[in-house]
């Protein structure tokens, strides 16, 4: 009676027929556990990547104070310039919508983040409005050192250009973030808390003005080497339904195998 009940249940739940009785148990179990294993590996990968990106982002965000004596501090910017011409969205050049992070040694009241308006002008304390459009961080730094020398003795200034980028999709804390162009795309995603277990960081999308751009983004790319500019959105899509539900499918196939085995043995 028990075997007949199992057979009837299997036929109702899984649509088994006489052909299924000949299906080897090993084959069905292999398919089930393969799907479950693939799902586990897919979900574990983004977690490890997110943790590594978060650690790197914290390390990159820590900068030593500028030394006195008016020395120019452009190390972080120069590392990514590589002699390439500045174009919108790349390198250390500034454009409307960007943010200038200004650090003046021993002058916390003058240091801060200053927006670049639609006309390409940023307003700095004491010196007022300065046109920064198409100016690299190193050139702006020299300009500010000369300008602030009228008010400070041997000012030591650090200039960091920032992009305003929105991170959306399968991330833990979607929102708008100021991004250093020297950071990688993985670091930008880490600023948003990292991708969720369902996030697919291998198929990132760049959206501008509501339109998806035909560019390929990888987590290894630095913002300076991509078309990313202020106002853009980085979208992290979800993984496919099959990958996200591999455990369920694997368990269902495994259960089917056990029921078929019981029917065949009977």
Image: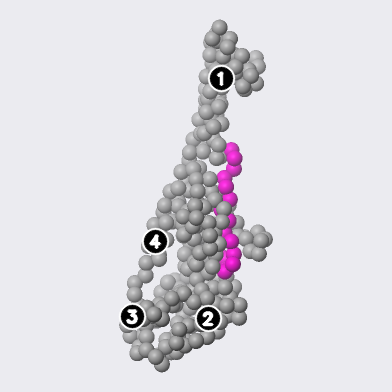
Tell me the residue that label 3 is attached to.
Answer: 106
- The residue that appears at 45% across and 89% down in the rendered structure is 147
Local secondary structure at mark 1:
loop
Residue 255, label in figure: none
- Residue 222 within the segment the image draws in magenta: no
Q: Mark 4 or mark 1: which is in front? A: 4
Local secondary structure at mark 4:
helix
Tell me the residue that label 1 is attached to.
Answer: 24
- Spot occupied by residue 182 in the image (x, y as percentages of width and height): 47, 67
Instruction: Specify which label sits upstream in the sequence, 3 or 1.
Output: 1
Whether tag 1 and tag 2 are in contact, CB under 8 A, the answer is no
Q: CA distance from mark 1 to mark 2?
A: 72 Å
Q: Mark 2 or mark 4: which is in front? A: 2
Instruction: Specify which label sits upstream in the sequence, 2 or 4.
Output: 4
Q: Mark 3 or mark 4: which is in front? A: 3
Tell me the residue that label 4 is attached to.
Answer: 58
Image quarter of residue 257 = top right
151 and 58: which is toward the camera: 151
Tell me the residue that label 2 is attached to.
Answer: 122
Q: Residue furthest front?
A: 109
- Spot occupied by residue 96 in the image (x, y as percentages of width and height): 58, 75
Q: CA distance from mark 4 to mark 1?
A: 53 Å
Q: Which residues are magenta?
A: 224-242
- The residue that appears at 63% across and 17% down in the rendered structure is 11
């Amino acid at each position: 009676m028990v075997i007949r009940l199992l057979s009837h249940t299997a036929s109702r739940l899984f649509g088994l027929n006489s052909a299924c009785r000949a299906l080897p148990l090993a084959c069905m179990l292999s398919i089930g556990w393969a799907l479950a294993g693939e799902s586990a590996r897919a979900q574990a990968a983004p977690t490890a990547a997110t943790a590594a990106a978060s650690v790197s982002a914290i390390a990159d965000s820590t900068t030593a104070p500028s030394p006195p004596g008016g020395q120019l501090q452009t190390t972080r910017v120069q590392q990514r310039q590589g002699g390439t011409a500045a174009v919108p969205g790349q390198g250390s050049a500034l454009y409307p919508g960007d943010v200038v992070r200004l650090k003046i040694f021993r002058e916390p009241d003058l240091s801060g983040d200053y927006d670049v308006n639609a006309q390409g002008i940023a307003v700095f304390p004491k010196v007022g409005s300065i046109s920064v459009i198409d100016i690299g961080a190193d050139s702006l730094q020299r300009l500010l050192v000369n300008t602030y020398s009228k008010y400070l003795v041997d000012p030591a200034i650090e200039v960091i250009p920032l992009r305003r980028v929105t991170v959306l999709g399968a991330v833990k804390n979607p929102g708008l973030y100021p991004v250093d162009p020297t950071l990688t795309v993985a670091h930008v995603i880490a600023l948003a808390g990292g991708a969720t277990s369902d996030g697919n960081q291998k198929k990132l999308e760049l959206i501008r003005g509501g339109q998806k751009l035909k560019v390929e983004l990888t987590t290894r790319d630095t913002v300076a080497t991509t078309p990313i500019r202020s106002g853009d959105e980085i979208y992290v899509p979800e993984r496919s339904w099959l990958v996200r539900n591999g455990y369920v499918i694997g368990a269902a196939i495994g259960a089917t195998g056990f029921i078929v085995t019981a029917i065949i043995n009977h």
